[in-house]
Amino acid sequence: MPGYDSKSIREEIEQAAQGINSAQELEEFKIKYLGRKGVLAQLTASIPQLAPAERAAFGKEINALKEKIALLVDEKQGAFADSARVSSKTPVDVTMPGIAQPVGRIHVLTQLIEEICDIFVCMGFLVMEGPEVESEYNNFTGLNIPLEHPSREAFDTFYLKRSPQDKERFLLRSQTSPVQVRAMKAYKPPLAVVAPGRVYRPDAVDASHSFMFHQIEGFMVDRGITFADLKGTLELFAKTVFGKDISMRFRPHFFPFTEPSAEVDISCIICKGKGCSVCGRKGWLEILGSGMIHPQVFRNVGYDPSRYTGFAFGMGVERIAMLRYGINDIRLFFENDARFLKEF
Amino acid sequence: MKVTYNWLKDFVDIAISPAALAEKLTMAGIEVKAVVENSGDSVFEIEVTSNRPDWLNIAGLAREVSAITGKKLKKQPAVPLPLSKTSRQEQYSILIEDKKDCPVYTARIIEGVRVAPSPAWLKERLEMVGCRSVNNIVDITNYVLFEIGEPLHAFDAERLQGSCVAVRRARPAEKLITIDGQERNLSPDILVIADGKKPVALAGIMGGKDTEVAAATATVLLEAAIFNPLTVRRGRQRLGIQSEASYRFERSIDWASVDAASLRACAMIIEIAGGKLVQSKRSGTLKRAPQAISLAVDKASRVLGTDITPRQARSMLASLGFGVKALGSKGLKVTAPSYRADVKEDVDLIEEIARINGYTKIPTTLPGFIVQEAAVAASDPVRPIKKILASLGLDEVITHSIVNRGILDGLWHGEGEVLELENPLNKEQDILRPTLVPSLLGCVAYNLRQKQERIAIFEIAKTYARSGARLSEEYMLAIALCGEKKIWHSGGCIQDKPGLLHLKGVIESLFARLGITGYKLTWNEQGSIALFQADSALLGTLRILEPALLERFEIKNRGVFVAELAVAELLRHRRTSRRFIPLPRYPAMNRDVSVTVKDSVPAGTLRDAIMRHGGSLLEEAEIIDFYTGKQIENGFKNITFSCRYRSAERTLTEEEVNPVHRAVTEALVREFQARIR
């Protein structure tokens, strides 16, 4: 290459390297010699102009220069890092926010539903869902709730406008219990199911009422399933969700689809049973309705009540979330304020 | 319902404190909500389940207290009530139009009463249980209602026209002013008590103003009857009234309490207000044959999971007033008392045994449950979708399924009809949503009002529609992006405004994780909605919402980008099985190509061409830079692709790659008039 003098270039490089006093200067140095249009690139580009005999030796020289530069850069880089460490004990302002992708959140109700279902799945239950638009039969009659009975009032219901084509009247399920009827009609015992989902009741909206909320229904049917099994299963569930140190009690209650029926209380998780405003000074919090499946429900789905017994339970997911996290207004779940969602 | 401790003590000995009694009642199924001290007595606020109307009175609760505390019930002294002579000539008669509406009606006439304020003790007891004192006669009927559970009504007999009391359906256009002063329009679905001329009371619901007992009343007709629970329920729903009487009639009345209550009230009236009983009339019968239920005691043990002996079962049932006889060595033949119409089969008796024995005595065990193979389903397929979206920085929301029809304008062009509610809570929430998009816009608007800068949300929920007689509900996934996103890098922070490509990116990432491939994104004919399609199935749509539409949701000066996808289609197209693809064994060789082309040439078309000409050696062509702006002429854009060449068999040499890459470059020039930079 005309005018090329490997020695003078080497000297020039060494001099330039000595003058480097900052990371920025080092960067400029790298660009000047190693960049796409840098000195070495130009030298390489000139190879074809050389006589074939000279090419190999010239290429070797260029490679040697490259190695030399790399060595110098390494040295300098180490020196800058060291001097930074020496001059200041905080190479990075660690009080600056970390750089990360924003993380989205699964809604707290979904998280809780998944957690609860998983507990039962561990015990052999399978998760099933049913439609939200239901027949009167599945929501009421099949569950031994007579059409005209005061007990129906507890399950006040939204009905759909009837179209002339409809053979029956449809409603929005007021509970997840119709999944019992559907599942038992579809499968023979032994059967254990948890069914989470949305339910609807025409309640005026306030801090503790919502016309839409979530329930989880569960049931187990087999030969020899007992009330003691119901107690054991729900105790295991409640202690997993609320902690091993809670106490529990089962109180007689009435549900048309179970007999005997029980309401399940846990000791107040706020006051540990001493009595506070959350538990209404009673020391107990109601979390579940449950009982042994009524023989009439078995007859309705074609199970033989003399062969099989089973238990069923149902719980309100919002209620459990409110108790567990101390949320005081049910409307927060459905307003979806980003700040609320981010808390869970 | 309210009851008092001392009132219960009239019927049963109680040796425990009010607090201890409250605890015992609660654990026996009568939930005591509160105990309040009041003038030396304790008032219990209790909740009675709809199956136990026999607990809606003091006597019935006293029976329960006796069973759970083991104390004997006190005998109530029978007061002899002979009929007295009267100067009155006419005899009252009772005419029941339909025995189904009213199986029995009794009327007792007491002459010569003096209506006055009640004695203090009577007033006080009524007030403790939340009943306002009116006068001695009315108070006595209420007192007996609370004590025995049979609602009574006292008419001023002088104000009744004629001497016939009829129980009949109201005639069309009949009216009645009830004791609360309201004029009620009646119809044939309402059962009334009528005198010779007109209705004088709403049967089982409320008396009439005109015939109520007032200061001048001297003769009282005391009604004690049983009305059909359904008739009362429909009547009071129709009229929108609820009373202590209707509450009890709806839940059905103990037949045996009709005469007991009537006689108790007569005795109290004569004692407190004077007068004499001169007539006692009845229509209908009071008897009902009790059903015997056989109970195998070992079944109780089997259902409860604890040992119950026949002896225990027998004594517990007897304590509750059941008739019990032995049936073989392990069986019982049980007859329910008249007030226990809820007991119909053996499990009802098992519940009584469990209740009286105490649920706490039942052990806790875990079921030895065997899983049935056929019923085991794969895990919830929707769950991973939610997890992927959250990992992409989106928050899951849950919004109401019931919405207002008006919000669909411009947002739903689906097929079929919307499902309407028959009884909406209000006009604002009258349909089941056929799309999730308006609900998400509501969420976006809400969060903008809360001054949230970046909103990236999704919901997976059902949408509902009708087509003909078919009602469908389908899980949809909706996504909405709005607001600015801060992006930090080592040099500082920049604001990134989301656009349709951000939305596409979310969906691409989701599809990649689900293994959905071979889909296309195109604009629809109107150019307003982009469609995701795979083998002619519509996976979903993307949309840039128009400002006018957003303004309806009070979203101003913001871009909102929404997508709605059919979850079933995503699941149908996802890859369900995975095979490991071996990692490349030989290094790749990268060659960049930077082209300037007309704006109208889609990047995807360029990439397709590169891939086509790159042949088997070209593994991937990735866009690594994009530029449009002042540096190049108007109407053109610059795109840089990084082409990755690789062979599975060997390390590629420049001699192999260069000609291929040259062919690629030349093809771009030839096919798209691209200028290579």
Image (cartoon, grey):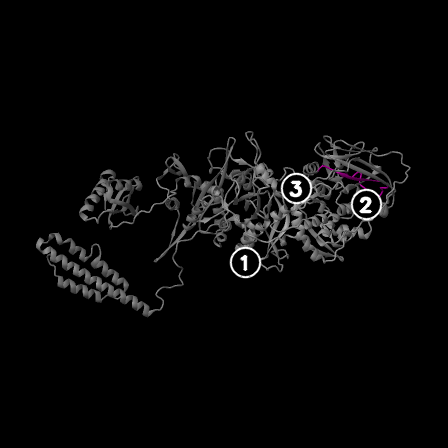
Three-letter amino acid code at the position of disc 1: Lys
Tag 1, which chain? A
Q: How far across and how far down the image is residue B300, in percent?
A: 63, 47
Between residue B435 and residue B533, name the one nearer to us: B533
Q: Is residue A114 above or below residue A186?
A: below
Q: Quadrant of residue A83?
A: bottom left
Label 2 and label 1: CA atoms lie apart by 54 Å
Q: Residue furthest front?
A: B329
Q: Which residues fall within the magenta stretch?
A: B208-228
Three-letter amino acid code at the position of disc 3: Glu
Residue B115 shows up from this direction: no
Label 3 and label 1: CA atoms lie apart by 38 Å
Between residue A22 and residue A110, name the one nearer to us: A110
Label 2 and label 3: CA atoms lie apart by 33 Å
Residue mark closest to the camera, 2 vs 3 = 3
Q: Is residue A128 above or below residue B366?
A: above
> Which of the two labelled residues, at mark 2 and mark 3, occupies the earlier sequence position?
2
Q: Which mark is residue A244?
A: 1
Tell me if residue A154 is in the magenta stretch. no
The residue at which mark 3 appears reads as B345
Residue B70 shows up from this direction: yes
Element marked by disc 1: loop
Residue mark closest to the camera, 2 vs 1 = 1
The residue at which mark 2 appears reads as B264
Tag 3, which chain? B
Mark 1 surroundings within 10 Å by alpha-carbon count, few (fewer than 14), some (14 through 19), many (20 or more) = few
Element marked by disc 3: loop
Tell me if residue B218 is in the magenta stretch. yes
